[in-house]
Image: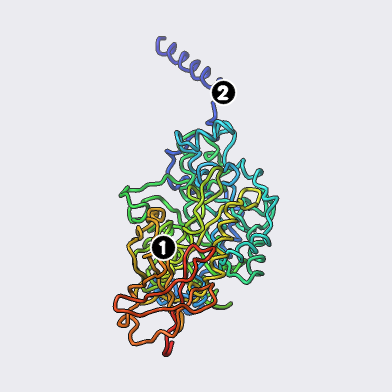
Amino acid sequence: MLLQFHSKVFCLSVALISSFPVMAQSSTAPTASAGAESLADAWSKASAKYDGSRNAILADVERGAHDGQFRPDWISLSRYQVPGWYRDAKFGIFIHWGVYSVPAFGSEWYPRQMYIAGSKENEHQVSVYGPLTKFGYKDFIPMFKAQHFDPQAWAELFKKSGARYVVPVFEHHDGFQMYDSDLSDWTAAKMGPHRDLMGDLEKAVRGQGLYFGASSHRIEHDWFMDGGRSIPSDVNDPRYAAFYGPAQIQLEDKTGGNGSDLADDWTYVSPGYANDWLARDAEIVQKYHPDIIFFDWWIGQPSVRPYLARFAAYYYNQSLKRGPVGIITFKWVDMQKDSGVLDIERGQLDQSLDRVWQTDTSVSNKSWGYIEHDTFKTPDFIVHQLADIVSKNGNLLLNIGPRSDGTIPDEVQQVLLAVGGWLTVNGDAIYGTRPWTIYGEGPTKVAAGSFQDTKTQNYTAEDFRFTTRGNNLYAIELAWPSANETVVHSLTSDALKGKQIQSVTLLGANAPLTYHLRPDGLHIDLPAKPAQGYAFAFRVALDGPA
């Protein structure tokens, strides 16, 4: 009887429990504890509608990576040679423009930082827009209208700046494509501006006779939104998985190397996501035929490198069918050193390099994208940096950050126009030049390496940078002397190796200058100081064959 009684009580208890509704887990609840493969699968399912288009592009990549002089291996890719136009161009414009220009706060990393509890961006987001379960990064997209975007005006400005190539960001870490893609719904052509922003810009830039590139930061999107996994937010909502991406939990053994040692990065990258990255970049090549592809640092992550080799072979082979070989810029040791062009972010080298390289930096000091209350570099800073980089066999890619409405801040325009004015007068000392036997002289030393460019001290009238073209040697003086004479100590008879000086002129001035070649260097009698000038280029014409 006792056993029968307990059985009835148990059955009654089960019935009562089952009569209560089961509380479903919120779609915005944290998912940081989910497995890496589970997160990848959720993104893959959300993106499945484009599997057919993606697979078709990947099949084309597989064919194209073996159809030409390059193959998807680093021995083959190490035979790459930079095209002459890029060596001659010296100066380009970089553009960070996207949905992150709507909040215009912190930096272009706002979409990541807004989901990191306790960050200034998170506090700003919640106080201005409300809880992240109600208003997430996706909700800025309708506010990104680009209603005043005038690609012709942009291209004309870039031409006046003296730039010879333009590289806009096609997709940043946030995962929003600024072009018309057949691989996603989350594009500027289908949302926000409802316009192929990059396609319009490409036509305008090429119409000005400039080279056009594309910057892809898609690979970092694998983990970029992972902060939203740890808190209640819309990043966890399966409805938005196609936009927010896998949002894998970033796993690094921190070594303090600013991301330089990707061998210590263990973040999960699924084959499906890596193939999607490959397909998206190949689609850009197919639709827009960029002369340059700029990649950020994470393409060197060990899981990604095989896909990078496939892309490089495909892109190089495809570009050669249309004209000069394309250019891929890379950071740190992401690619074999001869297989592309080394890029140094917000920094430069303290010595000349035997192969062409590039600095990318920004007119703005705080952010690559537009934010309110940013500060800006001066024209003389940019000119000095350009002269130093070119003397060391490098190019300068200078970034601007337009507003969300498509306008470029006046302060930025004025800097670009001032640099362009200097290049109009002094371009012979920059464009088409090659390094001399030494890059320069003077007491001011560059703070070498990434993220160091504002640490270099002000240049003096004793600082010169040298370039050459044909029989002309250019000595660019980085400040005007207080005396009536300047001395270039490196220009001695021995240094000129038997060549005789035919004349010395100051670019922008009409008359040849009086000079004396002495044991301690070339003494030049100075004219009146030019009314405008951030640096002063002397052309030293030499005899003999070029």
Whether residue 340 is visible: no
Amino acid type at circle 2 is Pro
Whether residue 433 is visible: yes
Q: Residues within 10 Å of mark 1 (few under 14, many from 20)?
A: few
Residue 21, numbered circle:
2
Tally the marks. Answer: 2
Residue 192 vertical placement versus 385 (above, below): above
Residue 123 vertical placement versus 45 (above, below): above
Q: Residue at x 52, y 67 (%)?
A: 292
Q: Is residue 82 left or right of residue 49?
A: left
Q: Quadrant of the C terminus?
A: bottom left
In percent of width and height, residue 44 lies at 53, 51
Residue 482, numbered circle:
1
Q: Quadrant of the N terminus?
A: top left
Mark 1 / mark 2, whichever is N-terminal: 2
Q: Secondary structure at mark 1?
A: loop
Q: Nearer the viewer, residue 22 or 283?
A: 283
In percent of width and height, residue 463 lies at 37, 65
Q: Residues within 10 Å of mark 2 (few under 14, many from 20)?
A: few
Amino acid type at circle 1 is Ser
| Residue at the far top in the pictured view | 1
Q: Nearer the viewer, mark 1 or mark 2?
A: 1
In percent of width and height, residue 83 lies at 49, 76
Q: Nearer the viewer, residue 423 or 540?
A: 540
Q: Nearer the viewer, residue 57 or 479?
A: 479
Q: CA distance from mark 1 to mark 2?
A: 86 Å
